[in-house]
Image (spheres, grey):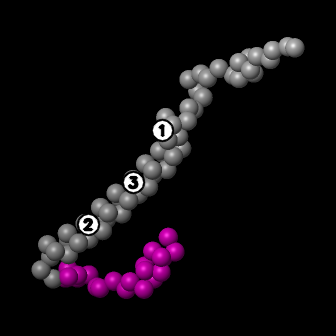
Amino acid sequence: MSTISTTAAVPAPDATTPVRGQGRSTPWWGIVALIMTEGTLFAGLIASYFFLRAASKQWPPPGIEEPKLTLAIVFSLVL
């Protein structure tokens, strides 16, 4: 009866082989960073709008007509 060694068939792990249970993959962190960057950008734009609105005595400021938001709302929903 012969004995079969199973250790020779399993490749040795190296630094490039991902190990289970050791965290998320690099693409996952890239997507998280992208989403967080875009969220920060949009939050800054929305916050600046409310800041300018709160700091102004009259809205919209004199000389600027009130914007029509119908097309902008549709494009925001599509985005």
Q: Earlier in the sequence, mark 3 or mark 2?
A: 3
Q: Position of residue 5 (x, y in %)?
A: 76, 16
Mark 2 = which residue?
A: 47
Locate the N terminus and report the quarter of the image it occupies: top right
Q: Position of residue 76 (x, y in %)?
A: 45, 74
Mark 1 = which residue?
A: 23
Distance Cα–Cα, label 3 vs label 2: 16 Å
- Could you tell me the amino acid type at mark 2? Ala
Q: Position of residue 73 (x, y in %)?
A: 43, 80
| Circle 1: element type | loop
Callout 2 environment at 10 Å: few (<14), some (14 to 19), or many (20+)? Answer: few
Q: Earlier in the sequence, mark 2 or mark 1?
A: 1
Q: Nearer the viewer, residue 46 or 31?
A: 31
Mark 3 = which residue?
A: 36
Magenta residue check for 43: no
Residue located 61% across and 23% down the image: 13
- Could you tell me the amino acid type at mark 1? Gly
Horizontal side, residue 58 vs residue 77: left or right: left
Can residue 21 be seen from the camera position used here? yes
Callout 1 environment at 10 Å: few (<14), some (14 to 19), or many (20+)? Answer: few
In this view, the residue farthest toward the top is: 2
- In this rendering, which labeled residue sits more in front, label 2 or label 1? 1
**First to last magenta residue range:** 59-79
Q: Is residue 22 above or below residue 73?
A: above
